[in-house]
Amino acid sequence: MKIEKLQKLLEDMSLEEKVGQMVQIPGAMMKKGGIITGPTESFELTPNILQMVGSVLGINGAEELRTIQKEYMEKHPHHIPLLFMRDIINGSETIFPIPLAQGCTFSPKTVEECARFAAREATARGLHITFSPMLDLVRDARWGRVMESPGEDSFLNAQMGKAMVRGYQGDTDTVGKGHMGSCIKHFAGYGAPEGGRDYDAVELSERTFREEYLEAYREAVKEGSAMVMTSFNTIDRIPATANEWLMRTVLRDEMGFNGVLISDWGAVDQLINHGVAKDSREAAKFAIRAGVDIDMVSNAYMKYLAELVKSGEVEENLVDEAVMRILKLKNDLGLFENPYKDGTKEAEERMIRCEEHLQCARKAAAESFVLLKNEKALPLSAAAQESLAFIGPYVDEKMLYGGWSYPMHPEKTITIREGASRKKSNIIYAKGTYVLEQGQHTTNGITQNYVQDEVKEMLADAMEAARSADKIVMFLGEHAKQSGEGASKVRIRIPENQMDLLRKIYQINKNIVTVIFSGRPVEVSEIAAMSKAVLMAWMPGSEGGNAIADVLFGEAEPGGRLSMTMPRSVGQVPVYYSRLSTGRPNPEGRTGGGINGYLDETLIPLYPFGYGLTYTDFRYSQVELDRDVMHGEDVITAKVTVQNTGDTVGTETVQLYIQDLIGSVARPVKQLRGFQKVHLNPGESKDVSFTIQEEMLRFYDIHMQYVSEPGEFYAYIGPNSDTENKRMFQLTE
Ligand code: GLC
């Protein structure tokens, strides 16, 4: 529809109709089924809103949504189509690795393909918008939602966020067939809650907030994301959902976002709990003034916005602006011409879990696994006579995906046993114990109840398996529901019953490899001490069993590099590589008093950002620069030669970090500014070059201006953020 017709439509709409467009309700309230992803006890659906609401969330299914859309549009005064939205954060029916694992691939190409296939399946099921990418910078593994983020680094998150927006939306202005609108979340800074406690206050300096926490959102907005979602937290003690500086000055004016801003679930009414709105009516006023276009599942807009306009407390043009953005979004999706978009039974049958998508999930999972330790214990040999025992509660686990994954057919997830049996027939399998300790429960109240006889039998079987096998592979991990929303933890460990199992097995047979499943970095020191190899599998998705078998038996390589630092202890958290040097630097990580660190633990994490082993070895030459002075428009080419010195083909993720030695404010000891994957045969060498530009050196200076400053810099190129392979260069006036 032409923009003039949209303008005319807006002019013809009643105030009640306009406000209706600004309300989102759970689709489950329109039709049975669907997921409720937030609290609804205080939500009082007004009768007429069902005729006026502009969008729904949490339902899908081509036929179901077609029926809802048809009935709704017939009754709507101007027959305006509904928007259907849902949390498709790592796949719709084909479940891809969790976003934290996707960050570990260091492959925007892979991440874009996962998003593109997720959109193909989701739109076939009638959806228009996904609440993804989540680009909150995360540096505190106690927070359950680190699972949903690409990781701790603003540069990496920005690359992954842009890739997801491209994958979901395609690369045209209108969102074409098989593509869907993306929604960047949670704006902003939600990943830094105090104590790692979900929904808690965020206390960041403006400089850190702008330079580190806003970068990925900024880049994804530039990529053209259709929507942005407000976050639950406060910034500078002002809840994001009522924060005019954040939403109008930063998001709209500075970042140039002109799409639709939606609140998070109930976040408008939660302004009351924050203590900044006395009631829902006042919450509505603050949110519309901040520029929130859609109120997701709260009473505020639905009950009070029209009245606020009629009383003159809210200017009607604020409503008109919001509704025009919503109508434009519907228009960009082509819904006025085809309100059902791509949702057809035929498309569902063709797209859902098609081979191309499953192969992508399998490849992405292998690329996301991080090999933390390997003392020649991996890969396993399918042919060799060595007998294998696969032990642990994950050997037959189907729940290999994180929260927000609601596949229609979870029973089709490939388990470890199914994947491995295709490689080697005589593996012994033993569960050993449950995933959770007795009585332990998860976010969704899944409580583990033990059957005592079964416990004894499982343990006995596992110990017997350990006695009879040459090599043990343990499959241990958090429960899938122990990370995600509302799943913050003070102990970031594998459940103690599983650790007990590992200790008992270790007493019998020390030839152990351990595969770990989790939605967050967990404490693995004790596991590593009892294992000759450790592989982080995160939550790998529908093809997890196949991907793990591929990597364990060497048919695929563990391609991941940590996108989030692995702490030795939760006491180190928050811990991340791009830190400040401090006034009493302690880079060696000494323990003791009077230094930057702890009396009782080193400050050095167990495994650093960017770290990951492969099945071969690589050697780096010294960093070479084609010039060591950058002036004006000059660029510097930094180069290394990487050689595969092992006897197996391998892919290395070569990383470029920059350090600004002196600034008008303290500068991080390193900042990731580039990465490239290079595939090398045994003995092969390749030159890997990066272009260093002045823009890479910019930061918020003492005057809060985003500039570079003349001075000395180091360019580091290496396999992870610990690298000391560096060369100095100068930036001159
Ligand atoms: C939740 C989450 C958000 C999600 C929304 C809709 O509370 O915070 O990430 O997109 O509700 O399900």
Image (spheres, rainbow, N blue to C red):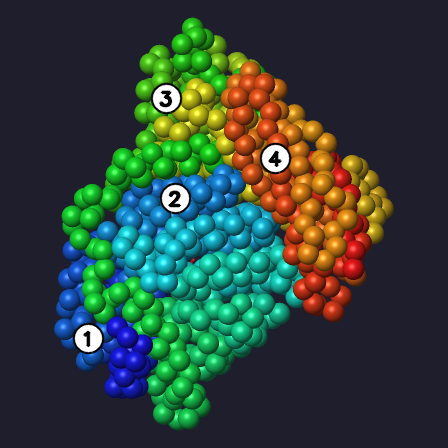
Q: Nearer the viewer, mark 3 or mark 1?
A: 1
In x, y percent, where is residue 676? 56, 38
Q: Residue at x 52, y 29 (%)?
A: 679
Report whether 715 appears left or right of 438: right
State which quadrant residue 684 falls in: top right
Tell me which label, 3 or 1, sits earlier in the chain: 1
Tell me which label, 2 or 3, sits earlier in the chain: 2
Q: Residue at x 35, y 77 (%)?
A: 324
Asked if one can make out residue 573 in the rendered structure from this viewpoint, the answer is no
Q: Is residue 278 above or below residue 427?
A: below
Amino acid type at mark 1: His
For this orientation, the residue located farthest to the right is 594
Please tell me the numbered disc located at residue 688. Answer: 4
**What residue would you read off at disc 2?**
113
User: Which SS class for mark 3?
Assistant: helix
Quarter, ligand 1 = bottom left
Q: Is mark 4 within 8 Å of ligand 1?
A: no
For this orientation, the residue located farthest to the bottom is 311
Q: Residue at x 83, y 52 (%)?
A: 583
Cα distance between the residues tagged 3 and 1: 54 Å
